[in-house]
Image (cartoon, coloured by chain):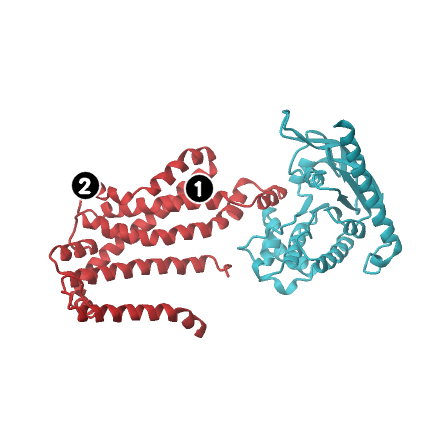
Amino acid sequence: MNQRLERWLPALAVFVIVLVAWEGLVGAFHIQRFLLPAPSLIWTTFWRVLPDLALATGYTAGNAIGGLVLGAALGVLVALATARWTVINEGLMPFAVAVNAMPIIALAPILNQWFGLQNPFSKISVVALLVFFPVMINMVRGLTQVSPAALELFRSYAANEFIVLGQLRLPNSLPYLFSALKVGASLSVIAAVVSEYFGGTQRALGQFISQRAGLFNFPEAWAGIVVACLLGLGLYGIVVAVERAAMPWRR
Amino acid sequence: MQLTDINKTFGGRGADAVQALKDINLSITSNEFVSLIGPSGCGKSTLLRLVGDLITPSAGDVRVNGKPAHEARLKREYGMVFQQATLMDWRTIRQNIELPLEVMAWSTDRRQARARQMLELVHLGEFERHFPWQLSGGMQQRVAIARALAFEPALLLMDEPFGALDEMTRERMQLEVLRIWSQTRTTVIFVTHSIPEAVFLSTRVVVMSARPGRISAIIDVDLPQPRNFETREDPRFFEKITEVREALRRDEARGVALRAATS
């Protein structure tokens, strides 16, 4: 326990120093609250708007998680299909890698119109699209990048392709998968919030932030932003916890 | 095991084709411990993989207990140990040994009992629930050997299994392999770079030469069994080592002369 604390102490110290400095600078230079509110103001504002904020966060979290699960599931399925039939793999991978490098978030307004602004699926689809590509690419790598010595070993056992898939390729791909899921967890919150900037129900975190900012109500907007950050961290933390449970052999 | 007129060429028929093996004929009876030794590129690893049906010969015939190599592989008559232990990180030591038994659809009880038995054989009983990363290189190789022998193959193929280990661990492992060999009575084909290792372990040493890979000499090692640290000090041990070394040097000289004559 003490060892853990020691590791986190420097980061904690930096965090506290930044907060204190922020508070101090705002006070010392009398920075207007509509430019940059002090942490203390954000704190008090947070408790004031909690009911609305909680509702909005619940909606956005649902979209983020739904999109994350959907994108990841599709990514794994497509990866399994392309790893099995390498012809598809060679045709698809270059495109997948290229699309992954593009700002998919730019499609958010279009997807909003396709499915309707009020329909949560318009937001979930953006998240799923963003999560799909890194998961698929990483999963394919994990399934195909097995050591030749291991493949020789299974050949010496006269094992069929299914056994090689289940006993070698799938376990080998788990670290790759979780690496992509960690990226996906952060991306999912970003995608959910940003896609909400373009419209839709007001009980959404993205709308909460953009509307308050539009009215120059920055303390409330910041409260929303802080919650969005915490949501992203929370999802990331959940993925890390699942990873530890799924791969108990890691040191 | 019988190798008849084995030839293996890599790279097709073009100018880049490399003849790895030429006219190999070798016969090995059961319970033998045969080493393959030779300079790099003499095809000893290729030959081992041909025996194990991991690659197919360009010409010639490999038979194990009367069956073609391919059939023998499908009947799981080979156990293989490579230079890297190639253990599955996500399985415990016992589960790693159970891997071939799972592939062969043994029942859970039978698998576990056999895995525990093999662990005892290689003196790693207390590490049943450990993971590979927790074991040293030598211990991992012992697990690989236990895994290779778990299903009692007729033939144990080893490709420089101790290459990555330090000298002292190597000597200990050599004694281990001999002990296991005498207990299980498998036939062993062992590829090595080390002349003392080949002589210490084997009943016969097959000396190979390169370009193209050929068998240049087969030397009987009639040192007494069981071999132990006393064997290492026996003057006959050194005589045999010299015999193998001379055979290797003769090939080298022949190769140099040949190249000088044709250039």
The colour of chain B is cyan
Q: Which residue is mark 1?
A: A80
Residue at 78%, 38% in the rendered image: B252
Q: Is residue B164 above or below residue B212?
A: below
Q: Residue at x 44, y 42 (%)?
A: A80
- Give the Cα distance between marks 2 and 1: 32 Å
User: How many circles with numbers are drawn on the protein?
Assistant: 2
Disc 1 chain ID = A
Q: Amino acid at mark 1?
A: Leu
Seen at 83% across and 49% down, the residue is: B241
Which numbered disc flags the more N-terminal residue, 2 or 1? Answer: 1
Mark 2 burial class by Cα count in 10 Å: few <14, some 14-19, many 20+: some
Residue labelled with disc 2: A113
Which residue occupies the foreground of this view, B22 or A29?
A29
- Whether residue A193 is visible, yes or no, is yes
* Image quarter of the N terminus of chain A: bottom left
Q: Position of residue B107 (x, y in %)?
A: 60, 52
Seen in the image, is A63 located left or right of residue A76?
left
Q: Which chain is red?
A: A
Q: Give me the disc on residue A67.
A: none
Q: Nearer the viewer, residue A11 or B136?
A: A11
Left or right position of A124 against B220: left
Place of residue A62 in the rendered image (x, y in percent of width and height, measured from the top left): 26, 54
**Quadrant hosting residue B175:** bottom right
Displayed quadrant of residue B58: top right
Classify A186 as above or below B253: below
Question: Residue B46: x percent and y percent?
Answer: 68, 38
User: Who is closer to the viewer here, B54 or A9?
Assistant: A9
